[in-house]
Image (cartoon, rainbow, N blue to C red):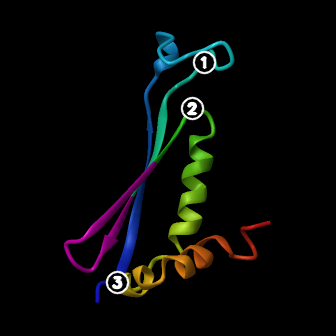
Amino acid sequence: MVKITGYKIRDVRFPTSLTGDGTDAMNTECDYSSAYITLLSESDLVGHGMTFTIGRGNDIVCSAISQVADRLVGKDTEELFKNMGKTWEYLVADPQLRW
């Protein structure tokens, strides 16, 4: 039984707006960015996840990830994986956050 002990979140940004890479008619000033999380455990096992944004607001996504990740710390991975539907419900159904 392996427990999640913590996490690290990284706000990774690439200044693509300087060269116009990745822009289109609607999104003319994109800075391709990624909110990246590493879940830590009491063993050598780690988990990784990421999502992409186009710049401003990536800090908001990182903050949201932190709020959800807080709910994983101290949890047993076997229990989390045993019923992914129940785990998903637990992660997204916090009455203070889902509003």
Q: Amino acid at mark 3?
A: Lys
Q: Which residue is mark 2?
A: 55
Q: Secondary structure at mark 3?
A: loop
User: CB under 8 Å between callouts 1 and 2?
Assistant: yes
Upstream in the sequence, badge 1 or badge 3? 3
Upstream in the sequence, badge 2 or badge 3? 3
Residue 27 included in the magenta stretch of the image = no
Using a 10 Å C-alpha cutoff, classify the residue at mark 1 as few (fewer than 14 neighbours), some (14 to 19) or many (20 or more): some
Relative placement, left or right, of 8 versus 67 is left
Residues drawn in magenta? 38-50
Q: Amino acid at mark 1?
A: Glu
Using a 10 Å C-alpha cutoff, classify the residue at mark 3 as few (fewer than 14 neighbours), some (14 to 19) or many (20 or more): some
Upstream in the sequence, badge 1 or badge 2? 1
Q: Which mark is residue 3?
A: 3
Spatial CA distance of label 1 from label 2 is 8 Å
Residue 61 in the image, given as x and y percentages of width and height: 59, 49
Q: Main secondary structure of the magenta part?
A: strand
Q: Amino acid at mark 2?
A: Gly
Q: Quadrant of the C terminus?
A: bottom right
Spatial CA distance of label 2 from label 3 is 33 Å
Identity of the residue drawn at 61% across and 34% down? 56
Identity of the residue drawn at 49% across and 29% down? 32
95 vs 36: above or below: below
Front in this rendered view, residue 5 or 34: 34
98 vs 89: above or below: above
Identity of the residue drawn at 52% across and 72% down? 70
Spatial CA distance of label 1 from label 3 is 42 Å
Q: Quadrant of the N terminus?
A: bottom left
Q: Which residue is mark 1?
A: 29
Give the image quarter of residue 74.
Answer: bottom left
84 vs 49: above or below: below
